[in-house]
Image (spheres, rainbow, N blue to C red):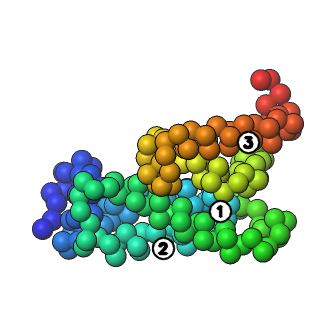
Amino acid sequence: MTMPLDAETEVGDDALLVLYANGDARAARLLTLRLTPRVFAQAFRMLGDRAEAEDVAQEALMRLWKIAPEWRQGEAKVTTWLYRVTANLCTDRLRKRRSVGIDEIPEPEDDAVGPAEALQDKARLDALQAALNDLPERQRQAVILRHIEGLGNPEIAEIMEITVEAVESLTARGKRALAAGLAGRKEELGYEHG
């Protein structure tokens, strides 16, 4: 069973996963192209390390392919399941790291080479990542999923296996902590006008 070429962009993630499970390699390619950037971004924000984020993204997608034959459409969204798996893989890696001092963790690499704007952007991203790293793990996860990945509170609650009210509390506390952590750096980061 294969999908028509003109329907590729309209086919949902659940349907693509079922098509893949039935032997459609194009469905797997399309789903990989859709989901990999999102999974990598979530992992990178949680871990702050490009290589580890790539490993987590690869592992999360491998787990998705393994469960494809048992996938039941309508029970959960593919993205929700994948965000939860990614978060759990990141949490496992963060727990293993706890014995390592924060100064020993390498800063995220920036591949961009360019003028002053690129340096300013890097300083801002580094400041944000450092501030995220200072948050408690659950607050960091909630803030990343809500404000960086753009997910809604009900989906975050499902991913984190908590209530919507708990998500709201975690994101509110996380935002306050981020604001407090970055408040004294406005001028340094180029935000002197506001």
In the image, 56 versus 95, the foreground residue is 95
- Farthest top residue in view: 193
Spatial separation of the CA atoms under disc 3 and disc 2: 30 Å
| Residue 168 image position (x, y, % from top left) | 56, 39
Q: Residue at x 33, y 65 (%)?
A: 29
Q: Residue at x 60, y 71 (%)?
A: 92
User: Residue 178 shows which numbered tag?
Assistant: 3
Q: Is residue 189 above or below residue 92?
A: above
Q: Quadrant of the C terminus?
A: top right
Q: Secondary structure at mark 2?
A: helix
The three-letter amino acid code for the residue at tag 2 is Glu
Q: Residue at x 73, y 42 (%)?
A: 178
Spatial separation of the CA atoms under disc 1 and disc 3: 17 Å
Q: Quadrant of the N terminus?
A: bottom left
User: Residue 47 shows which numbered tag?
Assistant: 1
Q: Residue at x 78, y 68 (%)?
A: 105
Crowding at dot 1, Cα within 10 Å, few <14 / some 14-19 / many 20+, comes out as many
Which tag, 3 or 2, sits closer to the chain's start?
2
Does residue 148 appear anywhere in the picture? no
Spatial separation of the CA atoms under disc 2 and disc 1: 15 Å
| Residue 36 image position (x, y, % from top left) | 45, 61
Task: Determine contact: label 1, label 3, CB under 8 Å.
Answer: no
Mark 3 against mark 2, which lies toward the viewer?
A: 3
The three-letter amino acid code for the residue at tag 1 is Leu
Q: Secondary structure at mark 1?
A: helix
| Residue 66 image position (x, y, % from top left) | 34, 76
Task: Determine contact: label 2, label 1, CB under 8 Å.
Answer: no
Say which quarter of the image contains residue 148: top right
User: Residue 20 shows which numbered tag?
Assistant: none
Q: Is residue 135 above or below residue 181?
A: below
